[in-house]
Image (cartoon, rainbow, N blue to C red):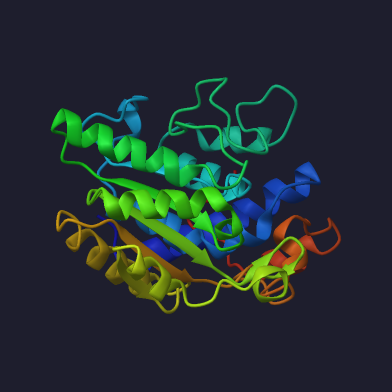
């Protein structure tokens, strides 16, 4: 287990990785990646029960994570590398032809830590629920987690899955919503207002945890611990995680442009200057 300070340091390094990866590739999705870095670090280093050195596709005996908003591969890959799923040096291959580190997660090359190809939004919750039911059928008491963008909740398949999980009491499952209020075409309120998410999940018989600041590591740790404590009580658990797109760099924060736009080579030094170098070192 890492201390809160250690986790914060790792999150800073991962934000540096995200910027350097996407700028070098001249493509990618840095905004949501930087916003969810604290959550991803907390999950991979402290919250989840998993063994990066002994990855299996079936996840038997280990917690499983499915990132439904598959476009945030920069944070997925960086965190996975930093926790030990594959060498950190491989981050240099991000989005290059033939790499295991494709722009969206792919199972084609057998990258440890990736159990589903994602990026077609709306599907990850169905996959996560299926995996959770599979664990129940085999007597596996580990948990299944998924991560979703708030704009993704505009997909109809999500609400079919929400209804199913509540009705079938899938209580070994935790779905986290990255609630940054931004999506590719503008704010979620402008595109399709999501309304009261907490009330909606509760109406479908879910238990709900709200993390008011998903870019505060201690709040993330406390909130996810609370979510874990609610499992096994006959209902799935939703975590509403309020984050800020582009967190860590002032000219990126809260700007939906950075959903899918990268920092230019000219602006990269200015961005990195706001994220101090760490003892972990750049790849």
In this view, the residue farthest toward the right is: 266
Q: Nearer the viewer, residue 28 or 140?
A: 140
Q: At 17% from the left edge and 62% from the top edge, which residue is drawn?
A: 229
**Which quadrant of the figure has residue 236?**
bottom left
Q: Nearer the viewer, residue 263 or 241?
A: 241
The mark tally for this picture is: 0
Residue 175 appears in the figure: yes
Rendered location of residue 161, percent (x, y): 42, 48
Rendered location of residue 230, percent (x, y): 19, 63
Rendered location of residue 121, percent (x, y): 60, 46
Residue 82 appears in the figure: no
**Left or right, residue 100 beside residue 158:** right
**Which quadrant of the figure has residue 7?**
bottom left
The C terminus: image quadrant = top right
The N terminus: image quadrant = bottom left
Q: At 28% from the left edge and 71% from the top edge, which residue is drawn?
A: 222
Q: Nearer the viewer, residue 206 or 106?
A: 206
Classify 259 as above or below 65: below
Q: At 37% from the left edge and 58% from the top edge, which residue is drawn?
A: 42
Q: Nearer the viewer, residue 205 or 120?
A: 205
**Left or right, residue 165 beside residue 112:** left
Q: At 35% from the left edge and 34% from the top edge, which residue is drawn?
A: 52
**Which quadrant of the figure has residue 209?**
bottom left
Rendered location of residue 128, percent (x, y): 38, 42
């Amino acid at each position: 287990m890492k201390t809160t300070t250690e986790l914060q340091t790792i999150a800073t390094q991962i934000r540096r990785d995200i910027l350097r990866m996407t700028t070098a590739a001249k493509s990618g999705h840095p905004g949501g990646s930087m916003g969810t870095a604290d959550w991803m670090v907390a999950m991979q280093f402290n919250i989840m029960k998993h063994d990066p050195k002994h990855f299996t596709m079936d996840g038997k005996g280990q917690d499983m994570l499915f990132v439904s908003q598959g476009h945030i591969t920069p944070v997925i890959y960086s965190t996975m590398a930093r926790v030990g799923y594959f060498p950190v040096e491989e981050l240099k291959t991000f989005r290059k032809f033939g790499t295991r580190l494709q722009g969206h997660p792919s199972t084609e090359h057998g990258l440890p830590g990736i159990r589903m190809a994602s990026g077609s939004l709306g599907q990850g919750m169905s996959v996560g629920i299926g995996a959770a039911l599979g664990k129940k059928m085999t007597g596996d008491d580990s948990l299944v987690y998924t991560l979703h963008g708030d704009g993704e909740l505009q997909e109809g398949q999500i609400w079919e899955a929400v209804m199913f999980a509540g009705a079938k009491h899938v209580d070994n499952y935790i779905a986290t919503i990255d609630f940054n209020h931004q999506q590719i075409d503008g704010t979620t309120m402008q595109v399709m207002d999501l309304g009261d998410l907490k009330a909606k999940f509760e109406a479908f018989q879910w238990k709900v945890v709200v993390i008011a600041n998903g870019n505060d590591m201690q709040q993330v740790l406390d909130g996810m611990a609370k979510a874990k404590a609610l499992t096994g009580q006959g209902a799935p658990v939703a975590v509403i995680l309020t984050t800020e797109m582009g967190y860590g760099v002032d000219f990126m924060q809260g700007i939906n442009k950075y959903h899918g736009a990268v920092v230019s080579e000219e602006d990269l030094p200015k961005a990195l200057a706001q994220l101090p170098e760490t003892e972990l070192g750049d790849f």
